[in-house]
Image (spheres, grey):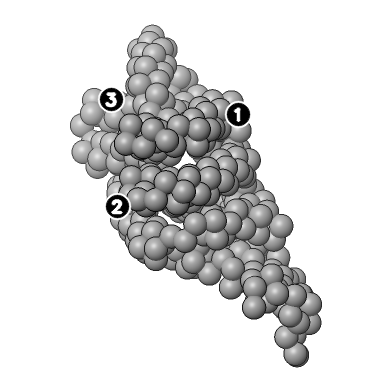
């Protein structure tokens, strides 16, 4: 019986919506299995994914669950922002050992505003991404890649391992920075309310961090699919007709990969824009805090600021590494095609069509079309950080600390 025949069979005792959920789960089982470590974390954070939302019995509790967690994040960030707006000088003096200038106060306000936009905006993007229709559309694109060419289970095992490794890094970095933040709050002169705000506000950063891990895992799947194309071209069958048929199939598979990357850009575009903007702002403010913390000879504060700076740099590195890997794997497919043409000149027509497609349909991650996400952002980060750091330092040095 064909695959489509199975879809049309209506099981006894299941209504139509239950049947659709069962079929969808069966079709997407491999990609969902790869993402399972992440989806469990997402559920704990108040972002359950479909198909739990498909069941009418649990739809309302799931929505209430999502609304509750989002309301908590919104309350924490708004309270923190309002407090820093009115008490920026007190917070500055508490963290900087009595050092406070209007420039430093403005830096604290700007940093907290960017942090609130980053966390709340990322949370909204996460909620929109995990809507039933959006999530199903995204997962269906990866399921089509599964069905297009039969990939070994090693691909999905490696993607699951990638998700686990990224989660381990996430836990380690959060525990480390949170421990430093708690110790710093124990010794500084901030009020108890402000200390609770700082710690709870930091913990809400888990939402954009988990979304970053999800993005990196999905782009890792795309890279593995391009690797599969390259390996099949390199180990082409001996028969010319079989090679010709395989090239046609792989060309179609490449089209599906390009469509999947377009959906990643569509559904993660706003988040990537917010993430990169946050990285640039925090790298500037953290650089200033590192210098001032060193001047005040506060080793704990210095360790905290250095840890935050390293963390945002790793965020940008993960974004650029996994995004660039898609471009790199596409180039390797192109090289494999040229090598195949050298070995089999009779395949010139099929190879030419494939290379032309690679030139015109080049998968690349972009931040909602504003800019391409790649390794070129790293030198831009360094240059921007140095420029604005020197400007802020001049404003700070021009004042007498109060």
Give the Cα separation between the discs numbered 3 and 1: 35 Å
Where does the image place residue 335, in percent across and percent down from the top left?
A: 35, 33
Q: Quadrant of residue 369?
A: top right
Q: Nearer the viewer, mark 2 or mark 3?
A: 2
User: Which sits in the foreground, 100 or 300?
Assistant: 300
Which comes before the other along the chain, label 3 or label 1? Answer: 3
Q: Is residue 55 above or below residue 391?
A: below
Q: Which residue is mark 2?
A: 176
Residue at the spot x=52%, y=28% of the render?
356
Label 3: how many Cα within 10 Å (few below 14, some 14–19, many 20+):
some
Mark number, residue 369: 1
Q: Residue furthest right?
A: 16
Which comes before the other along the chain, label 2 or label 3? Answer: 2
Which comes before the other along the chain, label 2 or label 1? Answer: 2
Where does the image place residue 113, in percent across and percent down from the top left?
A: 56, 34
Q: Nearer the viewer, mark 3 or mark 1?
A: 1
Where does the image place residue 76, in percent across and percent down from the top left?
A: 57, 51
Tell me if I can see residue 290 in this picture.
yes
Q: Is residue 253 above or below residue 136?
A: above
Residue at the spot x=33%, y=45% of the render?
234
Q: Which residue is mark 3?
A: 291
């Amino acid at each position: 019986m064909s695959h489509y025949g199975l879809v049309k069979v209506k099981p006894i005792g299941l209504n139509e919506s239950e049947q659709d959920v069962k079929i969808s789960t069966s079709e997407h089982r491999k990609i969902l299995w790869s993402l399972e470590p992440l989806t469990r974390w997402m559920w704990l954070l108040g972002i359950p994914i479909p198909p739990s939302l498909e069941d009418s019995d649990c739809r309302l509790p799931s929505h209430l669950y999502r609304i509750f967690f989002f309301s908590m994040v919104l309350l924490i960030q708004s309270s923190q922002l309002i407090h820093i707006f009115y008490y920026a000088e007190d917070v500055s003096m508490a963290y900087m050992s009595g050092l406070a200038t209007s420039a430093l106060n403005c830096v604290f306000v700007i940093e907290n505003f960017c942090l609130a936009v980053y966390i709340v905006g990322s949370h909204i993007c996460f909620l929109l991404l995990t809507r039933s229709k959006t999530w199903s559309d995204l997962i269906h694109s990866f399921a089509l890649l599964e069905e297009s060419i039969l990939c070994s289970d090693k691909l999905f095992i490696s993607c699951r391992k990638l998700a686990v490794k990224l989660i381990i890094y996430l836990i380690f970095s959060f525990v480390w920075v949170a421990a430093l933040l708690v110790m710093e709050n124990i010794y500084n002169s901030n009020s108890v309310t402000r200390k609770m705000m700082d710690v709870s506000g930091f913990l809400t950063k888990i939402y954009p961090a988990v979304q970053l891990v999800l993005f990196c895992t999905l782009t890792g799947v795309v890279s593995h699919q391009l690797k599969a194309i390259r390996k099949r071209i390199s180990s082409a069958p001996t028969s010319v007709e079989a090679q010709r048929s395989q090239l046609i199939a792989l060309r179609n598979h490449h089209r599906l990969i390009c469509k999947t990357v377009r959906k990643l850009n569509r559904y993660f575009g706003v988040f990537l824009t917010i993430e990169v903007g946050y990285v640039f702002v925090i790298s500037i403010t953290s650089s200033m805090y590192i210098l001032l913390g060193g001047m005040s000879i506060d080793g704990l504060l210095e360790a905290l600021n250095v840890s935050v700076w390293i963390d945002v740099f790793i965020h940008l590195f993960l974004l650029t590494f996994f995004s660039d890997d898609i471009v790199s794997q596409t180039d390797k497919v192109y090289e494999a095609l040229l090598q195949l043409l050298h070995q089999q000149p009779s395949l010139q027509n099929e190879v030419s069509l494939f290379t032309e497609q690679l030139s015109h349909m080049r998968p690349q991650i972009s931040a909602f079309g504003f800019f391409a996400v790649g390794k070129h952002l790293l030198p831009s980060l360094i240059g921007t950080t140095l420029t604005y750091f020197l400007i802020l330092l001049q404003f700070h040095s021009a004042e007498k600390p109060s």
